[in-house]
Image (spheres, rainbow, N blue to C red):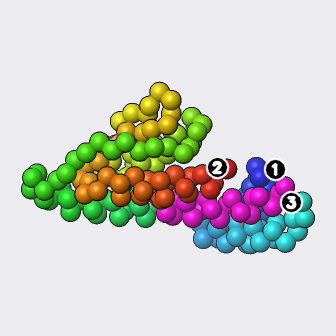
Amino acid sequence: MTKSMFLNNLILAIIWVMATGTLAEENFIFGFLISFGILYVITINKQDRKYFTILPKLVSFFLFMFWEIIKTNLVTVKESLYAKSKLKPAVVKVPLTVESDLEITILAIMVSVTPGTLVMDISDDKKVMYVHVMHVSNKQDFIDEVKNKFEKRLLEILK
């Protein structure tokens, strides 16, 4: 049902753009937000209401990932200016809560896309992910960061 709600939202946004006669990104986004509000008000079915919780979480998730990539890029640039003796590379064993192949793949991509980290392997039983990190001062802090920042947010969206 969330697919049909998203499609309805897109169609209403396109109708908004055609009705106003202004083909611009801002106008489409504004139309999308207006149609999101209209659909929220007129939707009675509880099954369709899931769309109104998933979409804001998804937008928040993408903004979070964008911010994390920018932040880790700056940290990586700063750390690359260190002398090699100050860097502390390590392979960290991160226990996984995610279970399905899709969840593990998305989490691995999320971790690998942030600079300074690279997922090296997933254990055969899919309970552990091995991550190479360019600079680790405390392995437990890194594990907590992956679990609380990435894995928790991913599970909120997918479950």
In the displayed structure, would residue 4 be above or below residue 93? below
Residue 17 appearing in the image: no
Q: How many residues crowd around disc 2 within 10 Å: few (fewer than 14), some, or many (20 or more)?
A: few
Report the predominant secondary structure element of the magenta stretch: helix
Please tell me the numbered disc located at residue 46.
3
Q: Amino acid at mark 2?
A: Leu
**In the image, residue 12 lies at what x, y percent?**
78, 62
Q: Which residue is mark 2?
A: 158
Figure quadrant of residue 51: bottom right
Task: Single out the mark in the foreground, 2 or 1.
Answer: 2
Reply yes or no: does residue 57 show up in magenta: yes
Q: Residue at x 83, y 57 (%)?
A: 48
Magenta residue span? 46-65
Cα distance, mark 2 to mark 1?
15 Å
Q: Amino acid at mark 1?
A: Met
Q: Residue at x 35, y 64 (%)?
A: 71
Q: Earlier in the sequence, mark 3 or mark 1?
A: 1
Q: Is residue 41 visible?
A: yes
* Image height of 67 relative to 132, above or below: below
Amino acid carrying mark 3 in the image: Lys
Q: Is residue 29 left or right of residue 139?
A: right
Q: Secondary structure at mark 3?
A: helix
